[in-house]
Image (cartoon, rainbow, N blue to C red):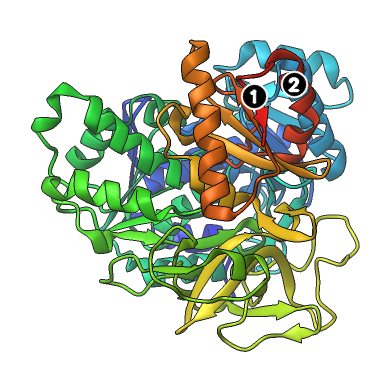
C-alpha cells in the first residue's frame, strides 16, 4: 500500500458522516479532518514535531478523533490512554499513566476538558510533561501550521498500549501500512460499505473501538459514537437508540450480550421491542464468547428482529491491528462440545453435550492478510490438535515499542499469542490462555473452564467470577450481592458441587467477594495477576462459611 491513513480518509471525506451522541453533534468526515488540521497547529505550537509521541486521555467523541488525526497531520505519533476508571484511585491511575509516558518517552499529554481534576493531578505529578486541555489546543491552533505532505506509509501512525490483562502494558507500534491492512482485514468479512452505519459505545482507546471506528471510515460508512458509560449503564436505552439511528454494525465484548439480556428481562417496557432488522453484524470479541449467552440473546431479541447470523464471534488483538479470524457471512454461531478432561491435556475430543463436556464457540477463519497456525512444543500441529495460536501477516506488528523481540516470537518469525486453541474443519476454537492454566496435583485446569461452570448460578453478580491458582489448589473468586449467611453458604456449596461434578476437581477454595471487586482491564478482562495478590483481603474479610475449601 502506498497511501497513509489520512490520505485514505481524505478520499472518503464526502462519504462518511459522524454522529456524536453525547455532544448532540453531527458533521461530515471532511469537516472533522479540517478541525483536526487546526488541532495539528495547536500541537505544533507546543513544540510537537515529526516522530514525537503525543499521548491523550479523551472521552469518546469528536475531541478524541481531532487529537488522533491532528497528531498524524503534525507527523507525530498519537497514543491514547485509558480513562481514569478502575485503577484503585488517583494514585494508581497516575502510576499507570506515568509508566506509559516513560515507556514511550512522551513530552505532551492532552486531557479531555471534562477531566479537569485528573488533568491537574497529572500536571502536578508529571512536571517534565506538558499537560494540556484539548481546549488549549483549539486556542493555540492559529500559532502553528501542519507540515506539508501526507507522510510515509512505513512511518508509525499510532501506538496502541495493551490493556495489561496478563502483564504490564506494552506498546504496539503500528505503521500506516499495518493499519490499512488491518482495516481491509475487518471491512472485508463484515461487508462494510458506504451504505452501512456503525454504532459504537466501546471505548476508542481500546483496540476494538479504535479499529472498528477506523474501519467504518475506511469503507466510507457512517459512524455513531456513544460514551462507554451510557452503553454499560443503560444498555437497553442504547439498543433502542442504536436501532433508531439505523445502525447496521457494532462491536462489543460478550459481557454486553449478558447485560442486554438482563436489561430486557427486567424492563417492564420490553414488550415494545425496537426494530433490529437492519442490524447485520455484531463483532463479539475481546473476551471469551459464551455459548449460553448467545442462546439467551437469540431467544430474547429474535422477536425484535435480530437474526442469529448477525452475531459474529471473532478473535483479535492489538498486535494484529485487531482482527485475526472472522466467521463466514450469513452463518449462525457454531458451537462444538468437547471432552473437558481431554482438553485440559491438550486433546480436542468432540463429545455430546453433558456434565463432562465443555462448549466451545467457533470464532471463524483467518481474515485477509493474516495466517494462523496452532503450535506445540515441537512446532506446528495438524488440524484437530490443540496448542498455542500463532499469527503472521501484514497487519501484525513487527515488535513491541522500544523492546527487543523476546520469546513471544517463534524462531521463524510468527507472533505467539499466548492463547490456546484448535482448528477443526477450518474453524478456530479458543479455550484459554497458556498462562491461565492451573495445575492441581499434576492435572491441568483452565481458569476460563471453571468460570464457565459457575458464572450462570443465581447469586453470581452479573456473571462475574474468576479462577486463579492458590498454593496447591484452585481459588475461585465469585462476586455476589447476597447478604444473608444462609444464601452465601448455599452459593459456596453450589459452586463446589458444580466444580466437582463437571470438572472432577475437589481442591478448590471459593471466595465470595463484594460486587465490582475483580480487577479488570479497560475491555473487561480480569487481571488475574492482580487478583492473586488480592486473595489475602478476601481470606481476612470472608470467614467460613461464606468462603470455603473442598
Q: Is residue 118 visible?
A: yes
Residue at horizontal 66 percent and vertical 18 percent from the top: 544
**277 up-or-down from 521: above or below:** below
| Residue 533, image quadrant | top right
Mark closer to the chain start, 1 or 2: 2
Measured from the top left, where is residue 194 in percent x and y? 29, 61
**498 up-or-down from 120: above or below:** below
Question: Going by the image, does 428 lie left or right of 320?
Answer: left
Residue at horizontal 79 percent and vertical 23 percent from the top: 536
Question: For mark 1, what is the residue?
Answer: 547
Question: Going by the image, does 93 lie left or right of 269?
Answer: right
Question: Going by the image, does 273 lie left or right of 207?
Answer: left
Q: Quadrant for the N terminus, please.
A: bottom right
**21 up-or-down from 391: above or below:** above
Label ID, residue 539: 2
User: Which of 334/181 is in front?
Assistant: 334
Tell me whether the residue at label 1 lies in contact with that at label 2, contact meaning CB atoms closer than 8 angstroms: yes
Secondary element under disc 1, as helix, strand or loop, is loop
Q: What is the spatial separation of the Cα atoms under label 1 and label 2, in whole angstroms?
A: 8 Å
Measured from the top left, where is residue 66 in percent x and y? 53, 38
Measured from the top left, where is residue 381 in percent x and y? 67, 86
Q: Nearer the viewer, mark 1 or mark 2?
A: 1
Question: Going by the image, does 43 lie left or right of 305?
Answer: right
| Residue 441, image quadrant | bottom right
Measured from the top left, where is residue 455 in percent x and y? 48, 40
Amino acid at each position: 500500500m502506498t497511501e497513509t491513513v489520512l490520505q485514505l480518509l481524505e478520499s472518503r471525506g464526502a462519504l462518511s458522516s459522524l454522529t456524536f451522541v453525547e455532544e448532540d453533534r453531527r458533521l461530515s468526515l471532511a469537516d472533522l479532518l479540517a478541525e483536526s488540521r487546526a488541532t495539528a497547529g495547536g500541537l505544533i505550537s507546543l513544540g510537537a514535531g515529526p516522530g514525537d509521541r503525543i499521548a491523550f486521555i479523551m472521552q469518546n467523541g469528536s475531541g478524541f478523533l481531532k487529537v488522533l488525526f491532528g497528531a498524524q497531520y503534525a507527523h507525530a505519533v498519537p497514543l491514547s490512554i485509558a480513562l481514569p476508571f478502575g485503577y484503585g484511585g488517583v494514585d494508581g491511575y497516575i502510576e499507570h499513566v506515568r509508566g506509559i509516558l516513560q515507556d514511550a518517552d512522551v513530552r505532551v499529554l492532552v486531557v479531555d476538558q471534562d477531566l479537569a481534576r485528573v488533568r491537574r493531578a497529572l500536571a502536578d505529578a508529571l512536571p517534565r510533561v506538558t499537560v494540556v486541555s484539548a481546549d488549549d489546543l483549539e486556542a493555540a491552533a492559529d500559532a502553528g501550521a501542519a507540515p506539508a505532505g501526507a507522510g510515509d506509509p512505513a512511518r508509525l501512525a499510532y501506538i496502541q498500549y495493551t490493556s495489561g490483562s496478563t502483564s504490564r502494558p506494552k506498546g504496539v507500534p503500528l505503521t500506516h501500512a499495518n493499519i490499512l491492512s488491518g482495516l481491509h482485514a475487518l471491512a472485508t468479512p463484515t461487508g462494510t460499505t458506504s451504505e452501512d452505519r456503525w454504532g459504537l459505545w466501546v471505548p476508542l482507546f481500546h483496540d476494538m473501538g479504535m479499529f472498528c471506528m477506523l474501519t467504518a471510515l475506511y469503507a466510507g460508512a457512517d459512524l455513531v459514537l456513544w460514551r462507554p458509560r451510557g452503553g454499560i449503564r443503560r444498555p437497553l436505552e442504547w439498543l433502542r437508540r442504536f436501532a433508531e439511528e439505523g445502525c447496521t454494525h457494532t462491536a462489543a465484548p460478550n459481557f454486553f450480550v449478558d447485560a442486554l439480556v438482563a436489561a430486557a428481562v427486567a424492563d417492564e417496557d420490553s414488550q415494545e421491542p425496537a426494530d433490529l432488522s437492519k442490524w447485520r453484524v455484531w463483532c463479539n470479541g475481546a473476551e471469551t464468547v459464551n455459548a449460553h449467552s448467545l442462546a439467551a440473546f437469540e431467544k430474547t431479541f429474535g422477536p425484535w428482529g435480530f437474526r442469529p447470523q448477525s452475531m459474529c464471534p471473532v478473535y483479535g488483538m492489538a498486535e494484529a491491528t485487531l482482527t485475526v479470524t472472522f466467521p463466514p457471512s450469513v452463518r449462525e454461531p457454531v458451537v462444538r462440545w468437547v471432552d473437558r478432561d481431554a482438553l485440559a491435556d491438550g486433546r480436542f475430543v468432540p463429545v455430546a453435550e453433558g456434565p463432562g463436556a465443555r462448549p466451545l464457540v467457533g470464532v471463524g477463519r483467518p481474515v485477509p492478510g493474516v495466517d494462523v497456525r496452532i503450535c506445540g512444543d515441537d512446532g506446528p500441529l495438524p488440524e484437530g490438535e490443540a496448542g498455542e495460536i500463532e499469527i503472521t501477516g501484514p497487519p501484525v506488528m513487527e515488535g513491541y515499542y522500544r523492546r527487543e523481540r523476546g520469546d513471544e516470537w517463534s524462531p521463524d518469525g510468527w507472533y505467539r499469542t499466548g492463547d490456546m486453541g484448535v482448528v477443526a474443519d477450518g474453524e478456530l476454537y479458543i479455550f484459554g490462555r497458556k498462562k491461565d492454566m492451573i495445575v492441581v496435583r499434576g492435572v491441568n485446569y483452565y481458569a476460563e473452564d471453571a468460570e464457565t461452570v459457575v458464572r450462570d448460578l443465581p447469586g453470581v453478580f452479573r456473571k462475574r467470577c474468576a479462577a486463579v491458582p492458590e498454593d496447591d489448589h484452585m481459588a475461585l473468586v465469585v462476586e455476589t450481592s447476597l447478604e444473608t449467611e444462609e444464601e452465601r453458604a448455599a452459593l459456596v456449596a453450589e459452586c463446589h458441587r458444580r466444580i466437582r461434578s463437571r470438572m472432577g476437581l475437589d481442591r478448590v477454595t471459593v471466595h465470595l467477594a463484594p460486587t465490582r471487586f475483580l480487577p479488570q482491564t479497560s475491555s473487561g478482562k480480569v487481571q488475574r495477576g492482580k487478583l492473586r495478590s488480592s486473595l489475602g483481603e478476601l481470606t481476612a474479610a470472608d470467614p467460613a462459611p461464606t468462603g470455603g475449601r473442598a
